[in-house]
Image (tube, coloured by chain):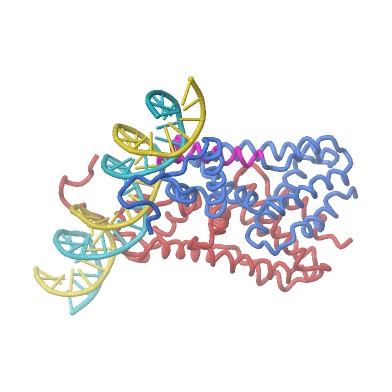
Chain colours: A blue, B red, C yellow, D cyan
Amino acid sequence: MNAATDSTPRAQRRLAPEVRRRQIVLEAARLISAAGFNAVSLADIADACGIRKPSVLHHFPSMADLLAAVLAHRDELSYPVRREVEDFADPAAVNEVFRSTVEHNQQQRELVRLYVVLRAEALDVGHPAHGYFLEREQRALDGFARALSWKPKPMLAARELYSFWTGLEALWVADPTVDMLEVWDAFAERFFTIS
Amino acid sequence: MNAATDSTPRAQRRLAPEVRRRQIVLEAARLISAAGFNAVSLADIADACGIRKPSVLHHFPSMADLLAAVLAHRDELSYPVRREVEDFADPAAVNEVFRSTVEHNQQQRELVRLYVVLRAEALDVGHPAHGYFLEREQRALDGFARALSWKPKPMLAARELYSFWTGLEALWVADPTVDMLEVWDAFAERFFTIS
DNA sequence: GGCGCAACCTATCGATCGGTAGATTAGCCG
DNA sequence: CGGCTAATCTACCGATCGATAGGTTGCGCC
């Protein structure tokens, strides 16, 4: 059961700080996306990395800092939509940009699940990610409204689209057999038509 | 600071079991809807009721049992839609039934938030409410599909509607200033029109 | 008015929580 | 090859977790 010699300090393999940090962030993201931040402990993350609790805290001062790093990591990987969207005034082109993002997200189960799970958890004002999602949600809605400026009420349309978008991701996370693109197209066929 | 005589057992007011049970369920629902099941402790609930931890466990054998009672309580209070919906084949009538439910839910912040928060938390297979939401989601989709049997692809339409529905509730929980009815109408105007 | 049921209490359990202190040693650099 | 930096370790902290054991007492019922 014990790989090393008994009752002696483990000859632990050392990793370069940036490599270890990356490993910790990846494992934390995996665990948190599965069960939520509140359900993951420092010990869980340390175990997943094959190190001890203080070693994790050596790289990240506290659990909250680690969560921040996970969110930052998530932002880096997220599909860069916003810039493009703003440039389009044509509904069909806007649809295509959103649609390709859905297509992209369908290959990123863990990342989408991380978002869905943390977003709900972070509704609590005391949650360490509360502010993050507060700001992020506002920015997303503003971006949507800008991309939908050809609609009579852009912010209303943005809320409608954002509701459907996040709801679809939540449904897909709960049931991976759902084809997000198919449902998206059903919605978009009406939503992006100027009647 | 101590209301009763010092160092003597508190002369605790007793309540009839059904009254106390009801109080515990209500307080637990309130706390869980605010922060999620994982973030609420037995002590939190006991404090909210003005009793001790073992007294809570006297009425509910474990935290999981208490959560089950909270979910059962939630089901009792939920708006009875399904029966009615099945009787309508007219899209406008179906819309009206859904719409009135949105209207009703807009007066039930805590209940809606309880649903939104627990649904995400329960994505984890190990969560005590995982099975509850698995079954509930399936039943909801089936009910929606039946109410949308006039659509070319009822289950696809059901997924679309359910995505929008739950997404709208999540958006509203995060930002109460959103008028759910307004967003609903924007969506429904297109969704319930046979083009 | 006193007796018994049970709602409530105190005290405590072992496990686990996030986090700290300080020793050990791997691995690079001169 | 010897010495320094720092990645990792062991050991431990006080708090809190859900749960159990067993005592106390409010209160309804005869």
Q: Would residue A65 be found to the left or right of residue A190 on screen?
A: left
Of A171 and C20, the residue lying toward us: C20
Q: Quadrant of the N terminus of chain B?
A: top left
- Number of marks in the rendered image: 0
Residue A17: within the magenta? no
Q: Would residue B9 be found to the left or right of residue A76 on screen?
A: left
Horizontal and vertical percent position of residue B174: 60, 44
Horizontal and vertical percent position of residue C1: 9, 68
Q: Quadrant of the C terminus of chain B?
A: bottom right
Residue B141 in view in this figure: yes
Quadrant assignment, res A167 = bottom right
Quadrant assignment, res B144 = bottom right
Residue for point 49% across, 62% down:
B126
Horizontal and vertical percent position of residue A190: 85, 54
Secondary structure mostly seen in the magenta stretch: helix
Above or below for D1 versus B141: above
Above or below for B188 versus B93: above
Residue B45 in view in this figure: no
Horizontal and vertical percent position of residue A100: 79, 48
Q: Would residue A184 be found to the left or right of residue C13 on screen?
A: right
Quadrant assignment, res A145 = top right
The residue segment tinted magenta is: A54-76
Of D18 and B113, the residue lying toward us: D18
